[in-house]
Image (spheres, rainbow, N blue to C red):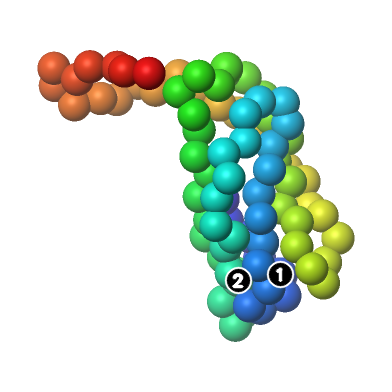
């Protein structure tokens, strides 16, 4: 996730719907209000469209669309485990 125009230093937390949201540490925007954050997609979650919400103190929640697709790249002789 990338964002801009967020309050600098304020924790930003991500959730999505529908699907499984894994608890993660917040992302903190830099002094210029930009950030790059990560979302963990769990193996048991289903593919398809999501709405991601970025929320935190000092700003209204922000939503964006996101598409979860099946992985297409894995190491040679990789094994999928759950």
Q: Residues within 10 Å of mark 2 (few under 14, many from 20)?
A: many
Residue 11 position within the rendered picture, expressed as x and y whole percent measured from the top left: 65, 67
In contact (CB < 8 Å): disc 1 and disc 2 = yes
Q: In the displayed structure, does residue 71 sit left or right of residue 25?
A: left
- Residue at the bottom extreme? 31
Q: Which residue is mark 1?
A: 6
The part of the image, by quadrant, that contains residue 43 is top left
Tell me the quarter of the picture where residue 15 sits.
top right
Residue shown at 50% from the left, 33% from the top: 41
Q: Is residue 8 above or below residue 71?
A: below
CA separation, marks 1 and 2? 7 Å
Point out the residue furthest to the left here: 77
Please state the horizontal and vertical placement of residue 58, each as a whole percent of the image: 82, 72
> Looking at the picture, does residue 39 appear above or below residue 34?
above
Q: Please tell me which residue lies in front, 49 or 81.
A: 81
Q: Position of residue 67 (x, y in %)?
A: 60, 28
Q: Position of residue 60 (x, y in %)?
A: 86, 60
Q: Residue at x 66, y 49 (%)?
A: 14
Quarter of the picture holding the C terminus:
top left
Please give left or right for residue 65 compared with residue 21 in the image: right
Which is more N-terminal, label 2 or label 1? 1
Q: Where does label 2 land, which residue?
A: 29
């Amino acid at each position: 996730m990338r964002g801009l125009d967020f309050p600098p230093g304020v924790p930003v937390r991500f959730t999505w719907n529908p699907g499984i949201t894994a608890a993660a540490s917040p992302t903190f925007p830099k002094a210029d209000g930009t950030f790059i954050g990560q979302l963990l997609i769990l193996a048991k979650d289903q593919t398809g469209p999501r709405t991601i919400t970025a929320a935190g103190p000092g700003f209204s929640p922000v939503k964006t669309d996101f598409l979860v697709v099946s992985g297409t790249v894995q190491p040679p002789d990789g094994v999928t485990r759950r």
